[in-house]
Image: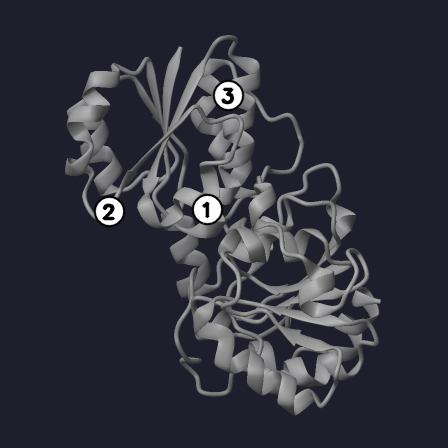
C-alpha cells in the first residue's frame, strides 16, 4: 500500500506527525510512506526511517501535483486539513481521510473562555485519520532523527559534558509565547548547572543580552550557531530542557529528557502539550491560572493585547526552579 501523508507546517505540528508515520509503517505490512511538506521543513522528516520518500513544495501544491498524480496513491492521510490540502486531494482523486481540527471549539475557548475541547492530545486526533486503515496508536512518544554529522560537539564548543547541562529554549515564533528576558535572567540565577541557550539566528542578539545580564560564566549562547538538527542534539543531550510552548518543545518530547515548559498566552487545553502518552510525569507545565484574558489566541501575538503580559510576568520562578532541580 502506497500512502501519502500531508502536513505543511509548523515545526511542532510536523514533529507531532511522527507517531502516526511510525504506526502506519509498522502496522501496514509492505507499506510505502511518502511525506509532503514545505521545503523549509524538509530536514525535520528526511532522516526518519519510517518515511520512504519526502516531497516538498516552495509555495504552491501546483509544483508537485503532476508528480503526485503519477504516484497513484492507495490512500492520502491529510494531517493539515485546510483549504489548500482539500483542493489538492480533490485534484488527486484518491481515497483520503483527515483529522478533526476542532476549530469551532478552539474559537470558543479563545473568544469566550468556554472550554469544550476534549481532553485529547492533537496526536491522538491525528490517529483518527488512520483508523479507517486499521492503524492505532502504540502509546509511544514521537521520533526525531538526528544524523551523526549534525550532532553538536558539546565538550569542544561549550566545555560541557552530555547530560550535565541545562538547555534553555529562549525563542518563540510569537512574542506572547516567549518568556521575557528579565524573567529568564532571574531563572538562570537560580541554576548552578552550565546552561546552553537554544534558539535560531533571530534569537542570537537576545541570547547575548541574557548572557551579559546574568553575569555568569557558565551560560553559553548557541542561538544561530546550529541548524535545527544541531539544536535538537543540544536538547537531546541536556540534563533537562526549559522551553516555551514552541516547536523545540515538541522536538524535546521525542527524547528521554525531562521538560519544564512555560506557557504564556496559549493553554495546554488546546491539545499541544508535550506528547508522552506513557510518561506524563516526565514533563511539567507552568502557567498563570485564573487570568480572564487567557488564552487570547490559539497561536500568539507579537505583543500582549492587554499591555500587561501577566501570563508571563506573573510566572512563579521558585516553582519553575523546584521542578528544574
Name the side, left or right, on which 157 lies relative to 24.
right
Q: Along the line of sight, which residue is nearer the eye, 294 or 59?
A: 59
CA separation in Å, label 3 and label 1: 17 Å
Mark drawn on residue 58: 2
Q: Quadrant of the C terminus?
A: bottom right
Q: Earlier in the sequence, mark 3 or mark 1?
A: 1
Marks 3/1 in contact by CB < 8 Å: the verdict is no
Secondary structure found at label 3: helix
Question: Residue 39: image x %, image y %?
Answer: 32, 45
For discs 1 and 2, the disc positioned in front in the rendered view: 2
At 70% across and 69% down in the image, what residue appears?
A: 158
Answer yes or no: is residue 120 visible: no
The residue labelled by disc 1 is 13
Q: Are marks 3 and 2 in contact (CB under 8 Å)?
A: no
The answer to which of marks 3 and 2 sits earlier in the sequence is 3
Residue 124 locus on image (x, y percent): 55, 35
Mark 1 crowdedness (10 Å alpha carbons): few <14, some 14-19, many ≥20: some
Residue in the picture at 52% in, 19% down: 25
Q: Is residue 308 left or right of residue 278?
A: left
User: Which residue occupies 74% across, 62% down?
Assistant: 155
| Residue beneath the point at 44% across and 80% down | 304
Q: Which residue is mark 3?
A: 24
Q: Quadrant of residue 143?
A: top right
Disc 1 secondary structure class = helix
Q: Is residue 196 visible?
A: yes
Instruction: Describe the element under mark 2 as helix, strand or loop.
Output: loop
Give the class, few, some or many, for how many residues have Cα within 10 Å of label 3's Cα (few <14, many ≥20). Answer: many
Q: Nearer the viewer, residue 113 or 103?
A: 103
Task: Evaluate if marks 1 and 2 touch, with contact meaning CB atoms under 8 Å apart.
Answer: no
The image quarter containing residue 174 is bottom left
The image shows residue 278 at horizontal and vertical percentages of 73, 37
Tell me the CA gap for discs 1 and 2: 18 Å
Amino acid at each position: 500500500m502506497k500512502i501519502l501523508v500531508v502536513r505543511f507546517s509548523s515545526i511542532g505540528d510536523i514533529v507531532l506527525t511522527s507517531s502516526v508515520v511510525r504506526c502506519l509503517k509498522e502496522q501496514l505490512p509492505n507499506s510505502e510512506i511518502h511525506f509532503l511538506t514545505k521545503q523549509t521543513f524538509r530536514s525535520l522528516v528526511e532522516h526518519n526511517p519510517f518515511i520512504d520518500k519526502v516531497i516538498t513544495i516552495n509555495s504552491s501544491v501546483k509544483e508537485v501535483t503532476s508528480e503526485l498524480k503519477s504516484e497513484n496513491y492507495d490512500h492520502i492521510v491529510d494531517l493539515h486539513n485546510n483549504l489548500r490540502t482539500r483542493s489538492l486531494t480533490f485534484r488527486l482523486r484518491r481515497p483520503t481521510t483527515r483529522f478533526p481540527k476542532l476549530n469551532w471549539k478552539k474559537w470558543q475557548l479563545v473568544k469566550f473562555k468556554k472550554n469544550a475541547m476534549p481532553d485529547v492530545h492533537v496526536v491522538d486526533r491525528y490517529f483518527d485519520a488512520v483508523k479507517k486503515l486499521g492503524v492505532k496508536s502504540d502509546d509511544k512518544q514521537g521520533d526525531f532523527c538526528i544524523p551523526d554529522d549534525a550532532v553538536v560537539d558539546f565538550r569542544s564548543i561549550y566545555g560541557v559534558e552530555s547530560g550535565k547541562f541545562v538547555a534553555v529554549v529562549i525563542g518563540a515564533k510569537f512574542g506572547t509565547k516567549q518568556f521575557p528576558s528579565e524573567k529568564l535572567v532571574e531563572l538562570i540565577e537560580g541554576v548552578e548547572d552550565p546552561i546552553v541557550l537554544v534558539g535560531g539566528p533571530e534569537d542570537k542578539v537576545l541570547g547575548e543580552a541574557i548572557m551579559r545580564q546574568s553575569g555568569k560564566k557558565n551560560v553559553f549562547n548557541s542561538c544561530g550557531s546550529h541548524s535545527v538538527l544541531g539544536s535538537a542534539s543540544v536538547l537531546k543531550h541536556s540534563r533537562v530542557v526549559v522551553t516555551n510552548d514552541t516547536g523545540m518543545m515538541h522536538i524535546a518530547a521525542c527524547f528521554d529528557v525531562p521538560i519544564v515548559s512555560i506557557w504564556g498566552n496559549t493553554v495546554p487545553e488546546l491539545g499541544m502539550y508535550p506528547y508522552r502518552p506513557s510518561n506524563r510525569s516526565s514533563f511539567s507545565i507552568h502557567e498563570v491560572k485564573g487570568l480572564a484574558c487567557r488564552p487570547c489566541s490559539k497561536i500568539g501575538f507579537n505583543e500582549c493585547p492587554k499591555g500587561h503580559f501577566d501570563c508571563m510576568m506573573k510566572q512563579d520562578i521558585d516553582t519553575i526552579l523546584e521542578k528544574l532541580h
